[in-house]
Image (cartoon, grey):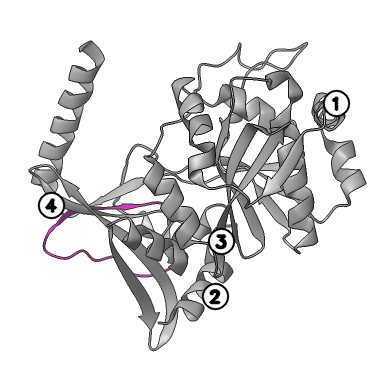
Amino acid sequence: MDHTTWNQFVLEHGPRSGRFLQSWEWGEFQTAMGEQVRRDVFDDEGTVTGVAQWLERKLPGSGIYCYCPKGPIGVGQLQGGHKELFLRIEPATPSFLQGAKKSVDLSPTHTRITSLTDTEETLLAQMHSKTRYNIRVAQKHGVVVEFGSHDMDAVWNLFKQTSTRGEFRLHDKRYYQTMIDSLATGDCRAFLATASHAGDLLVANIMVDFGDTRTYLHGASSNQLRNYMGPYLLHWELIRDAKTRGLTYYDWWGVAPLEDSPPARGGARGGGSTHPWAGISRFKRGFPGVEYASPGTYDLVLQPFRYQLYQVGRSLIRIVRRYV
């Protein structure tokens, strides 16, 4: 199957949130990062019924497993080779989950998606009043938004600051730069978007466009001038730009489940939250949107005994890390 046909199938049958991870271009980016990428096509009497893009991962002393982020897509019969301990899958439908074991979730299982079919005036009216106010604050301070004008060297310090604050685990710089370089053109496109004031960078986002959806994949912000509200204006301008390009959805790529969300001002919701995404989820929920959940990450075990040994090893590692 060529890359055009592959992407057409993914766009037609894949989940709106995260289907870019099954795009042909994402596989090429992973190859550039040194990953072993395999693409499977399932068919029924010559008709394509499903696809799966796998990343082969090594397990120290335990062989390998294959990971299919936000897939497989469609329907088909999963089969491993002779080497894999298990297949790690994240399908949107239950057809691939028979006999699979729940694992630790890797991609977000809960997200918020904003429909871009409404007018800008309607979107503004649907925002939380504090979000609208903060957009105006950023505009009043003269915050400048730019798309695709910086490389990772320019924004790397923001990513390190954000990682230090504990908001997300940081890949190395090469990972982000390779993503932007590999996905500069094609059906799946990644780009940097920044907000700055008087030449000082305030915010940097890595965005991914695929099909009709723009996804907020990674974000970083400065420890300085946080009262200038750069993230609010940056996302609003990204939404406006997506509308002008004909995209119809804006995926915020992960929120805490509602039962784990922080209490609303003036009311209670579960007594607060210790969820690591509580703060960023409150920010995202200030924008209009609808929330969706997916099944999550599962392991289809191919070698049960060795899989049990792998699980025991993981448990021991977690215990050691907890007390060291």
Residue 251's place in the image compared with 38, above or below, is: above
Query: Along the line of sight, which residue is nearer the eye, 214 or 156?
Result: 156
- Most distant residue in the right direction: 121
Q: Residues within 10 Å of mark 1 (few under 14, many from 20)?
A: some
The CA distance from mark 4 to mark 2 is: 34 Å
Q: Which mark is residue 189?
A: 3
> Which residue is disc 4 drawn over?
303
Q: Are marks 4 and 2 in contact (CB under 8 Å)?
A: no
Tell me which amino acid carries mark 2.
Answer: Gln
For label 2, the crowd category at 10 Å Cα-Cα, with few meaning under 14, some 14 to 19 and many 20 or more, is some
Position of residue 189 measured from the top left corner of the image (x, y, whole percent): 56, 61
Q: Are marks 2 and 1 in contact (CB under 8 Å)?
A: no
Residue at image position (41%, 51%) is 90
> What residue lies at 68% left-to-right and 21% top-to-bottom?
226
Write down the quadrant of residue 228 in the picture: top right
Which mark sits nearer the N-terminus, 2 or 3?
A: 2
Q: Position of residue 199 (x, y in %)?
A: 68, 34
Q: Is residue 175 magenta?
A: no
Q: Is residue 208 above or below residue 280?
A: below
